[in-house]
Amino acid sequence: MSKFILIAQSVGDVIDKLTILQIKNEKIKDTKKLTFVKREITYLRLVLSKNNVKLETDVIKELLATNSEIWETEHKLRDKSISKDQYIEAAKNNALLNDKRFILKQKLNKEYECDFQEQKSYEHIES
């Protein structure tokens, strides 16, 4: 029996989740983990298709690229061999990338006139 919870979600959040899963599909080597990743990718693509969401757009490509950069930055932040200065630089970069990610998700939400949209309460940092 399959167990999951059905909830309403913004297009931006669903596409964000899909792009992260696509990155995991490339990066993860464990076949058991990949089974779950591939299952969720298939499901999300089906849901998006049924809702007439285009998956080959410039905004989605940019979101995928941004999430790939975040993946690499997170990897750097977990590297115990980097210096304090390198860590600080990676953390700043991660914050900038997450701001960019937020903007891209908002573009998708506006395009699809979503009722639910992520909100932030802090100011964007300067690069």
Image (cartoon, rainbow, N blue to C red):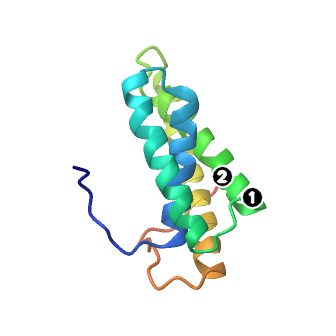
x and y, in percent, of residue 30 in the image:
42, 21
Q: Quadrant of residue 106?
A: bottom right
What's the mark number on residue 101? Answer: none
x and y, in percent, of residue 34 in the image:
44, 31
Residue that label 2 marks? 127
* Residue 93 in the figure: left or right of residue 75: right
What's the mark number on residue 56? Answer: 1
Tell me what residue is drawn at x 26 percent, y 63 percent.
5
> Closer to the camera, 45 or 82?
45
Q: Of marks 1 and 2, which one's residue comes earlier in the chain?
A: 1
* Residue 47 in the figure: left or right of residue 57: left
Q: Quadrant of residue 12?
A: bottom right
Q: Residue furthest front?
A: 1
The relative height of residue 102 versus residue 35 in the rendered view (above or below) is below
Tell me what residue is drawn at x 47 percent, y 86 percent.
115
Q: Secondary structure at mark 2?
A: loop
Tell me what residue is drawn at x 63 percent, y 72 percent.
108
> Closer to the camera, 94 or 114?
114
Q: Work out whether residue 111 can be spotted.
A: yes
Tell me what residue is drawn at x 74 percent, y 58 percent.
56
x and y, in percent, of residue 88 in the image:
49, 35
Count of marks placed on residues: 2
> Closer to the camera, 39 or 20?
39
Q: Residue furthest right?
A: 58
> Closer to the camera, 97 or 114?
114
Circles 1 and 2, Cβ within 8 Å, touching? The answer is no
Assess disc 1: are there few (<14), some (14-19) or many (≥20) residues with their C-alpha within 10 Å of its C-alpha.
few
Question: In the image, what residue type sits under mark 1?
Answer: Glu
x and y, in percent, of residue 74 in the image:
48, 34
